[in-house]
């Protein structure tokens, strides 16, 4: 009989050992966060690394013991870059997984479609969408946007053009939703630097000849021409400007004048074209950690932003001591701005918060300081110039 | 969880309505319409523009206007495409839906462009808890599906429906029999479009937001799949097929989440693969759909 007793003892012991962690787990209900990224569809090139950037933060937090002893559990869904599919996915995250925050919506239409669900169910929404209208929604503070809106982008452009001595700017713009708003903002901003907007022509971007548009621009005798279009149309316009003997300044968004454009045109056509674009904070330790996490030297801006979404959500929950959308809404600005110890690492931030210190988080995407409506106050921009079919960085600031 | 199931039931109902509309046009009258999402967009935009952007009509009036406008649009498209059949009709209707989307994206003053229209009112939205609103809307959708289903059943079993089926099977023979084929085709198209526009209007009032990007051909494909899976030609098939498609799309979320060791992007890909595989399997096993059309034989009156 001692044998049987032994066996029984072993069984009880094993059961206890198995049961113990689950008892502990049951005591600490995990913190639930949601990731809603464009894994398929038009956003497919960005979504996967956006998701990895979020997962990296969640893993780091869990490896360091979670938030207040609670593990962070990430629930992920695919927007399919389609508002209809995204709404169903968001319903699942909110109603089934009961997440406190949804992070990383990309397309503006997707974000605007998902936003009412979030604020009605008091779930925080972190987004990288750029449309100005998003933060103007009646979201009651439940939206945080890390992507600079067009107002900030054009303000930075005006500042840059002012520094380069531009006084009279003509705009050649492709027909897009932001063409007209951009002109209005540039017209408002340029006088601060002693410049003005000489005029604008909006063109259909599928055209193959832009001779008359270029003539109209030259007739206004500008010193700078702002090519507010996309790569295919800007390629043609640059060639036509060169043929017309244009020697003045040319400026275009970095997504239009990219390496592909520079490779397709002779260097003398593109030389001297300057570009500007929002940039991640490449000097930040958070950016360097993200480089290592994603295994690339050049993480895209969206991944940098979602990396910060996850950090901000975790730190706000730690600061609040509660894992709800409202808690994040109330506390996200207390850990991201307004002074305190500067932190770029979520784990260090959690440690400092445990010690009762005040922190000011700045991440891979920049300072992460937000207005009352949820827009970022500022972010670094990268300014480049085309020289010999290559882009040379003028500065990042 | 309950809230989520209710929301998905609403989506299934709205897809079901569109499948019923498609069934009138395609299942009964035999006209392939791949421009379904265009009519959905016309309905959604009409009601949204009249209830929030350009006027503040009550919701029922907005929906009524949506039905009338889409019926007119449907009749117009049917007249324009009167000489087309089969693949050609499919391409032109597909083109119609893309034109609607591009107009919505570019007529910025009228439709607010790619920013879309937000804050579309819903019945008692904001006055009741979100879960209650969901339930109210499910009730409305269920009622709408029931009414439209009964109307479609009436059409199907009436002499009118018999003419539509005759046109579907051979419109020349029908014409020889003295039926005004073009009139029947136009009316069927208008009725089907009106039902789709009705669903589109409800869709807008439910989601509170519409944008051109939301009306892509993918939705047409969902609805065509729903009708094919349910059984082309039968109204019950349209509704059951829509429920099935939504169940496939949503159920796969939970299935793929249980697969260990996959990256997020792989999970998303497996899910899309699984949805496609399930539909292929269903159509392989039952090519005629779950509820195939049976010939309705009415008893011949005794000659004596």
Image (cartoon, coloured by chain):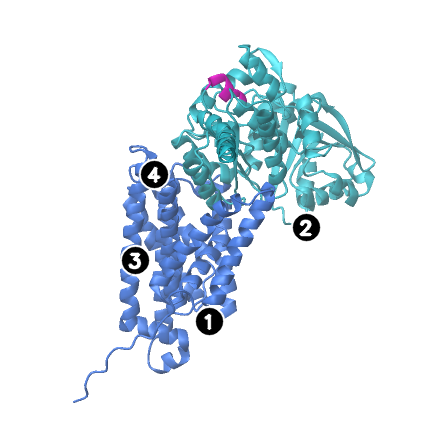
The numbered disc on residue A208 is 2
Q: Which chain is cyan?
A: A
Query: Can you say whether A298 is above or below B157 in the image?
Result: above
Please tell me whether mark 3 sits on a helix, a strand or a loop: helix
From the viewer's side, name the closer residue of A220 and B201. B201
Q: Nearer the viewer, residue A115 or A131?
A: A115
Q: Are marks 4 and 2 in contact (CB under 8 Å)?
A: no
Q: Is residue A379 visible?
A: yes
Identify the residue position indicated by label 4 in the image: B121
Pointer 4 or 1: first along the chain: 1
Q: CA distance from mark 4 to mark 3?
A: 23 Å
For the residues labelled 2 and 1, say whether their Cβ atoms are less than 8 Å apart. Answer: no
Q: Which mark is residue B83?
A: 1
Location of residue B79 in the rendering, given as x and y in whole percent from the top left corner: 41, 66
Q: Position of residue A304 (x, y in %)?
A: 63, 29
Q: CA distance from mark 4 to mark 1?
A: 41 Å
Chain of the residue displaying label 1? B
Q: Which residue is mark 3?
A: B148
Disc 4 residue crowd, few under 14, some 14–19, many 20+, Cα 10 Å: many
Chain of the residue displaying label 4: B
Instruction: Reply above or below: B56 against B191.
Output: above
Q: Quadrant of residue A280?
A: top right
Residue at image location 57% in from the left, 26% down from the top = A62
Disc 2 to disc 1, how far (Cα)? 35 Å
- What residue range appears in magenta? A315-321
């Amino acid at each position: 009989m001692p044998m049987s007793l032994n066996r029984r003892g072993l069984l009880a012991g094993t059961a206890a050992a198995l049961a113990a962690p689950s008892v502990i787990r049951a005591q600490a209900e995990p913190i639930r966060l949601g990731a809603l990224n464009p894994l398929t569809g038009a956003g497919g090139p960005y979504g996967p690394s956006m998701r990895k950037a979020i997962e990296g933060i969640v893993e780091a937090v869990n490896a360091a013991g979670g938030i207040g002893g609670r593990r962070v559990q990430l629930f992920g869904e695919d927007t399919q870059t389609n508002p209809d599919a995204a709404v169903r996915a968001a319903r699942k995250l909110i109603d089934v997984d009961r997440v406190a925050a949804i992070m990383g919506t990309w397309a503006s239409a997707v974000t605007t479609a998902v936003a009412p669900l979030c604020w009605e169910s008091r779930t925080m929404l972190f987004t990288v969408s750029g449309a100005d209208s998003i933060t103007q929604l009646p979201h009651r503070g439940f939206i945080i946007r890390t992507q600079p809106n067009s107002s900030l982008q054009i303000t930075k452009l005006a500042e840059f053009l002012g520094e380069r001595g531009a006084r009279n700017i003509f705009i050649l713009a492709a027909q897009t939703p932001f063409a007209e708003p951009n002109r209005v903002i540039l017209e408002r901003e340029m006088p601060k630097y002693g410049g003005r907007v000489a005029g604008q022509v909006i063109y259909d971007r599928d055209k193959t000849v832009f001779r008359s548009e270029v003539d109209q621009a030259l007739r206004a005798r500008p010193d700078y021409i702002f090519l507010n279009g996309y790569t295919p149309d800007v390629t043609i316009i640059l060639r036509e400007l060169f043929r017309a003997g244009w020697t003045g300044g040319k400026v275009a968004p970095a997504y239009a004048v990219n390496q592909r454009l520079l490779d397709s045109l002779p260097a003398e056509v593109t030389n001297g074209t300057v570009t500007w674009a929002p940039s991640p904070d490449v000097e930040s330790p958070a950016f360097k950690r993200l480089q290592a996490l994603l295994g690339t030297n050049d993480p895209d801006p969206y991944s940098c932003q979602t990396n910060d979404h996850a950090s901000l959500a975790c730190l706000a929950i730690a600061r609040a001591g509660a894992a709800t959308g409202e808690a994040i809404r109330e506390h996200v600005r207390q850990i991201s701005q307004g002074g305190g110890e500067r932190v770029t690492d979520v784990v260090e931030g959690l440690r400092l918060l445990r010690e009762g210190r005040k922190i000011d988080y700045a991440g891979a995407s920049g300072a992460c300081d937000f207005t009352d409506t949820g827009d970022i106050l500022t972010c670094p921009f990268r300014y480049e110039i085309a020289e010999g079919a290559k882009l040379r960085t003028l500065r990042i600031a | 969880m309950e809230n989520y199931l209710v929301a998905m039931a609403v989506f299934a109902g709205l897809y079901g309505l569109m499948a019923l509309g498609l069934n009138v046009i395609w299942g009964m009258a035999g006209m392939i319409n791949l421009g379904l999402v265009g009519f959905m967009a016309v309905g959604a935009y009409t009601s949204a523009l009249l209830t929030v952007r350009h006027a503040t009509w009550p919701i029922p009036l907005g929906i009524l206007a949506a039905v009338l406008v889409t019926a007119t649009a449907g009749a117009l498209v049917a007249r324009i495409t009167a000489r087309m059949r089969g693949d050609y009709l499919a391409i032109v209707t597909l083109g119609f839906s893309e034109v609607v989307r591009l107009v919505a994206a570019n007529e910025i003053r009228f439709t607010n462009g790619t920013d879309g229209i937000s804050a579309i009112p819903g019945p008692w939205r904001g006055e009741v808890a979100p879960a209650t609103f969901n339930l109210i809307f499910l009730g409305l959708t269920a009622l709408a599906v029931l009414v439209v289903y009964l109307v479609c059943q009436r059409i199907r079993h009436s002499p009118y429906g018999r003419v539509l089926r005759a046109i579907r099977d051979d419109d020349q023979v029908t014409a020889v029999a003295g039926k005004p084929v073009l009139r029947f085709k136009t009316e069927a198209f208008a009725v089907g479009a009106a039902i789709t526009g009705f669903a589109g209007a409800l869709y807008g009032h439910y989601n509170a937001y519409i944008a051109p990007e939301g009306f892509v051909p993918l939705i047409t494909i969902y609805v065509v799949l729903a009708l094919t899976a349910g059984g082309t030609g039968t109204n019950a098939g349209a509704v059951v097929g829509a429920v099935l498609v939504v169940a496939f799309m949503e159920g796969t979320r939970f299935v793929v989440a249980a697969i260990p060791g996959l990256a997020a992007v792989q999970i998303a890909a497996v899910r899309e693969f699984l949805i496609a595989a399930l539909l292929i399997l269903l159509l392989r096993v039952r090519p005629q759909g779950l509820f195939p059309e049976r010939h309705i034989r009415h008893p011949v009156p005794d000659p004596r």
